Image (cartoon, rainbow, N blue to C red):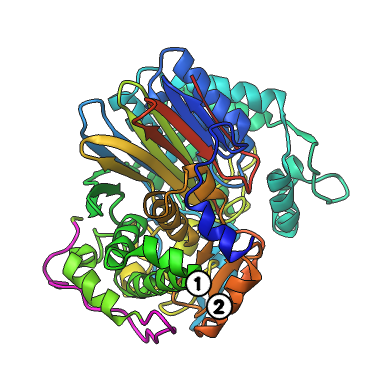
Amino acid sequence: MALASLRQSSAVDASPQSPNGAVATKGMVASVHPLATDAGVAALQRGGNAVDAAIATALTLGVVDGHNSGIGGGCFILLRRTDGQFVAIDGRETAPAAATRDMFLKNGEPQGDWSVTGPLAVATPGALAAYNLALQSHGKLPLKDLLNSAAEIAEKGFALDRIYARNLKSSQKSLAKFPASAALLLKEDGSPRLEGEIVQQPDLARTYRQIAEQGCDYFYTGPFAHAVGKWMKENGGLLTVDDLAKYEPLLRQPLKSTYRGRTIVGFPPPSSGGVHVAQILNILENFDLKNIYRKSPGELTHIVAEAMKLAFADRAYWLGDPAFAKVPRGLVDKKYAQDLAAKINPNEVIKVPKQGQPPAWQSDVFAKHTTHIATADAAGTWVAITQTVNTSFGSKVIVPGTGVFLNNEMDDFSIAPGKPNAFGLVGAEANAVEPLKRPLSSMSPTMILEGDQPVMTLGAAGGPTIISQVLLAIVRHFDLGLSLEAALQMPRFHHQWYPDELRLESSTPAELQKDLATRGHNLKTVSAIGTAQGIIWDQKTKQFRGAHDPRVPGKAAGI
């Protein structure tokens, strides 16, 4: 795509019938898998609201997209009630009570694989408890019905799509270390199942059905918890029955900021996403992005990348679980953002040797692999759920008989301050390992309002690129005038301060790449950056427009 066509695309609104979009009037669901989206739509058709649709989608993703998320992981749920109030449910995993800050060190040296694969990588799962809390407080349908519908898919089986098959191939050696994982996804000769092959999950179906009959106690205090605790004890893990029994989802105060007159509602720490989406938007508010883009797409890309870099430097130092670390509210202060914006040189990269110092950082603090789901209904309930088991297939562990992939969220801690994790992110003391602490996350479930009317909900998957994906969708839709479908199609870029490189999708025009290199960026091209889903409310047509990321075989659909 030439730069001229990039400029012209900002004035073109993608058709509602575009391949990654859908239109509806009563309710909308968007996710990374057609079967999961269909489950959400079915919940709406049965009289459920957007909360029911979101949880139905989430539970089904745990079956058909289990390499990304499931009840063995965690989630953040951001929802808007019909009365206009916002609710943030923190279902993030917690470190086991026996965790220590040096548990991933051997002779003083960090052992990176310990936090990625196997029993030590597993934190206490929180997704199921968060789903249950959302349904009991804000849904219409019982958890039992949604679980049984997903269990039916697990029993009958589903065909592996290209994304699942690709991740399975790349995780083959690690999965082979754990008999239940290997038995499910590898063939007798140890080779991975291929795209199009049918995978049945009778153990996962059984776990879902038992939870449906016995409630969440089956998972957190009953047979599932005891099976996990026994396996962990026998295999050197730290997670115990007591850890599972004591887990509680937390209600947090949603993070609200503004951007060019609109209200941005995000998730507070331990999500870094809400903070840094707001921070970067605050920085960019100091630039006339629309006119800059018309003049030079390269300059726009450069300015946004520099804003990302400044924010990620702050992320590395300041962010952590607010129950254990002082996370400054000043990170989303408008004056602080102006000071950061003033550092950006529109013609060349700047050096960012360390984090900034937000105002009142000592006193004004926040109170103590992945997939995204977006749903909305005509009554005014909107939901954004980002959920994960971290990297593909989490820890790679399925405890025999359960069918559930357990997360590897311990890698989201700073296993040794300054040591990069699986995503290349570095962290400081604020995100060091501590018992019962929630690791820092990039998950960014987000909603945007014009006046009191929600007009967009979105989120993404892809580790730290979640933040940049959400940011780019907002900028491209509201500043550049693209439809949400077109905004998600456009080539993405990402800068996370460390390593000092600007990641670009390979579809980025050569002319633009040359422009950015001339400005001093160290470029790294990748095939794709993350996946995002979203919904907008078209106030002119009184319609929902859902969009899924064209990089994956997802689906947006409604009623």
- The image quadrant that residue 358 belongs to is bottom left
When the figure is inspected, residue 89 is found, relative to residue 353, above or below; the finding is: above
- Residue type, numbered disc 2: Asp
Q: Residue at x 58, y 58 (%)?
A: 5
Mark yes or no: residue 209 visible: no
Query: In the rendered structure, does residue 355 fall within the stretch colored magenta?
Result: yes
Q: Residue at x 61, y 53 (%)?
A: 392
Q: CA distance from mark 1 to mark 2?
A: 6 Å
Chief SS of the magenta region: loop
The boundaries of the magenta stretch are 345-366
Q: Mark 1, residues whose alpha carbon is within 10 Å: few (<14), some, or many (≥20)?
A: many
Q: Mark 2, residues whose alpha carbon is within 10 Å: few (<14), some, or many (≥20)?
A: some
Q: Helix, strand, or loop for circle 1?
A: helix
Mark yes or no: residue 481 visible: yes
Q: Residue furthest top?
A: 46
Q: Residue at x 37, y 40 (%)?
A: 456
Which mark identifies residue 150? none
Q: Are marks 1 and 2 in contact (CB under 8 Å)?
A: yes
Q: Which residue is mark 2?
A: 515
Query: In the rendered structure, does residue 10 fall within the stretch colored magenta?
Result: no
- Residue type, numbered disc 1: Gly
- Image quadrant where one finds the N terminus: bottom right
Q: Which residue is mark 1?
A: 298
